[in-house]
């Protein structure tokens, strides 16, 4: 019998911040879902007459996606921050589970989220999606 265990990580408690220290916006209290999503593109490459192959180039890009609670007009509103900073490239830090200590950092382009919804109900969740610009960095505890 193997002594290996199955490992899982539950998301949260964690943090998600956008912007530099002087203008940092914390989304952690509004976010209900968040994930970094990779996209990999690979060129087909070439095969020459001898049968040898020259591999195609590989490129990778990321988006930060999720949902947050619609909060237009509230103190420290995420809806307002996204609208006011749309199109801006800002640093971000995402810590999926503080107890695990791993963080992801980089720069993303802020995009506004939907504003409004159905009348006379609590319009809770709004989707967001931001393109990560350049490299995504994984920072492990103690290393």
Image: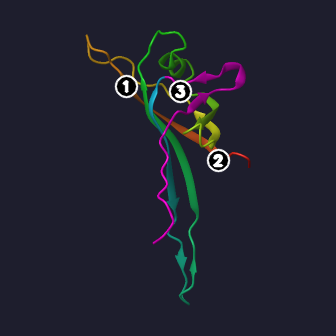
Q: Residues under labels 3 and 2: Cα distance? A: 19 Å
Question: Residue at image x 58%, y 23%?
Answer: 26
Which mark is first along the chain, 2 or 3?
Answer: 3
Q: Residues within 10 Å of mark 2 (few under 14, many from 20)?
A: some
Question: Residue at image x 51%, y 66%?
Answer: 3
| Quadrant hosting residue 116 | top left
Q: Which labelled disc corresponds to residue 35?
A: none
From the image, tell me which residue sits under label 3: 28
The picture places residue 57, in percent across and down from the top left corner, at: 58, 64
Left or right: 7 as drawn, with respect to 108: left
Report the label total.
Answer: 3
Q: Residues within 10 Å of mark 1 (few under 14, many from 20)?
A: some
The kind of secondary structure element at disc 3 is loop
Q: Which labelled disc corresponds to residue 138?
A: 2
Image vertical order of residue 141 relative to residue 129, above or below: below
Is residue 74 found inside the magenta-colored segment of the image?
Answer: no
Which mark is first along the chain, 1 or 2?
Answer: 1
Q: Residues under labels 3 and 1: Cα distance? A: 14 Å
The kind of secondary structure element at disc 1 is strand
Q: Which stretch is magenta?
A: 1-29
Q: Nearer the viewer, residue 102 or 24?
A: 102
Which mark is first along the chain, 1 or 3?
Answer: 3
From the image, tell me which residue sits under label 1: 125
Q: Residues under labels 2 and 1: Cα distance? A: 28 Å
Left or right: 60 as drawn, with respect to 91: left
Q: Residues within 10 Å of mark 3 (few under 14, many from 20)?
A: some
Image vertical order of residue 85 relative to residue 13, above or below: above
Is residue 25 found inside the magenta-colored segment of the image?
Answer: yes
């Amino acid at each position: 019998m193997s002594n290996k265990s199955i490992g899982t990580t539950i998301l949260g408690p964690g943090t998600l911040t956008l912007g530099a220290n002087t203008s940092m916006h914390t989304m952690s209290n509004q976010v209900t879902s968040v994930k970094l999503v990779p996209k990999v593109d690979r060129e087909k490459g070439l095969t020459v007459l001898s049968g040898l192959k020259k591999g195609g180039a590989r490129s990778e890009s990321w988006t930060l996606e999720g949902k947050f609670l619609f909060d237009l007009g509230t103190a420290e509103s995420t809806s307002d921050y996204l609208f006011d900073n749309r199109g801006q490239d800002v640093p971000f830090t995402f810590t999926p589970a503080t107890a695990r200590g791993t963080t992801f950092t980089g720069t993303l382009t802020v995009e506004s989220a939907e504003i409004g919804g159905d009348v006379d109900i609590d319009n809770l969740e709004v989707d967001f999606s931001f393109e990560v610009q350049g490299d995504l960095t994984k920072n492990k505890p103690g290393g």
